Amino acid sequence: MKKFLFLVASISLFVFYSCQKPQENEKPYLIMLSLDGFRWDYPVYASTPVLDSLQKAGVIAESLKPSFPTKTFPNHYTIATGLYPDHNGLVGNSFYAPGLKKFFRISDRAAVENGAFYGGEPIWVTAEKQNVRAATFFWVGSEAKIDGMRPDYWYKYNRSVPFKSRVDSVKHWLSLPQNERPHLILWYYYQPDHIGHKAGPYGEKTIAMVEKLDSLLGYYFTQMRKLPEFNRLNFIITSDHGMAEISNDRVVLLDQVIDTADIDMIVGSNPNFNIKVKPGKLEKVYRQLKNTPHIFAWKHDSVPRRLHYGHNPRTLDITVVAYPGWSVLSGRIRNVGKGAHGYDNDFKDMRAIFYAAGPAFKKGFIHPTFENVNIYPLITTIMDLKPAKNDGDIKNTESMLRIK
Ligand code: AMP
Ligand code: ZN
Ligand code: ZN
């Protein structure tokens, strides 16, 4: 009798585990690639057959609206956290954090790797906390310990790692044994932003880069299709912001309109800056900036609400941003190049791309433009994760999903 009961217990345990295991294996996958500075309408100017085919295989958004300021670090971290830059702490590519008494600059490795600068909960931390393995091949924030956590697999930023090697790593991760395999992967490539600054959004070299990237996406999907799990993979291809055409003929020099003796610090880069003024000088400096043509200047009680900006102490006293297509410089005068971003996010040239495909997504679906704070709750929904507090709402994207 004892032996019989033991047998029944062992069989039930076996049945229990074999029912559990497939569930574990059936956890959804999400692989998101960001191509820096890929403007929403580049596929109109360039030939992009791979992206066009994604449109048929899945979802394309008319465009993705970035958050203000439309720079690389704030927006990648907004995509990762679902929080506007004012709420996630990355209020610019460079800023001063009064609470930490430290500057943040993207070229400063110690700052980039210092978790104290990064607020909110990035999606890889959300995943790790809920026992889902995550990997990043470069994503803003993933080189720092946030909430004491990093992705299971991650690298220190090195721009020169070729696109194809990054694809090969993604493929390798997805080929790992199930208990080591990440189900959430974020990866990044610095083009076409880099060439867009030099050649401008309509430059021949920029269009050629967009076409090259499209053929590299062909390599990416060819490699992904070789994976036994391919039919279970959900893909997002997106970007942090667009690119506007600028010229050396449209430049505002801050040092010519304000008295540098009134200023404590000017932090930022073309076309936007945060300014801290000396005590008693706020009204004077604000008036001077307000009266300067081709720039907007806001004290932090007057930033338009739609920008969700100006409450974080890191935004200092005054925010300045150039009119679309204009440049604003502080310090030495220099060649501004042919392309820039960082402007008001209502400026259409700042918009980015959003493509998605996989079992979670509808096929041949065109989604209206949406804000990038909504990507975080979209991913938590697809991956069945409990989201941390964020500024997005799944209602803004759920019509693109097959599952609800
Ligand atoms: P920007 O165009 O100034 O907003 O910034 C784009 C630059 O950010 C690209 O040229 C990248 O090389 C750089 N970048 C992206 N991710 C990182 C990172 N994790 N660490 C340092 N630099 C980065
Ligand atoms: Zn960027
Ligand atoms: Zn850029």
Image (cartoon, grey):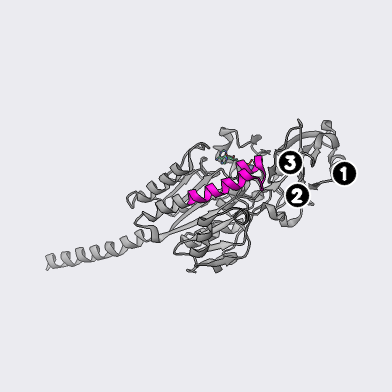
Give 156 or 165, whichever is nearer the viewer. Answer: 165
Residue 310 is marked as none
Instruction: Classify the position of the N terminus by image quarter.
Output: bottom left
Which is nearer the N-term, disc 3 or disc 2?
Answer: 3
Spatial separation of the CA atoms under disc 3 and disc 2: 15 Å
Tag 1's secondary structure? helix
Is residue 201 within the magenta segment? yes
Q: Could you classify mark 1 by the number of other residues whose Cα lies within 10 Å: few (under 14), some (14-19), or many (20 or more)?
A: few
Q: Amino acid at mark 2?
A: Pro
Give 12 or 44, whichever is nearer the viewer. Answer: 44
Pinpoint residue 384: horizontal percent, then vertical percent: 46, 62
Which is nearer the N-term, disc 1 or disc 2?
Answer: 1
Quadrant containing ligand 3 reads top right
Range covered by the magenta-colored residues: 194-217
Are the residues at dot 3 and dot 1 in contact (C-beta closer than 8 Å)?
Answer: no
Residue 324 is marked as 2
Q: Report which residue position mark 3 lands on.
A: 273
Residue 213 to residue 7: above or below: above
Q: Could you classify mark 2 by the number of other residues whose Cα lies within 10 Å: few (under 14), some (14-19), or many (20 or more)?
A: many
Tag 2's secondary structure? loop
Pinpoint residue 107: horizontal percent, then vertical percent: 60, 34
Q: Report which residue position mark 1 lands on.
A: 287
Q: Amino acid at mark 1?
A: Arg
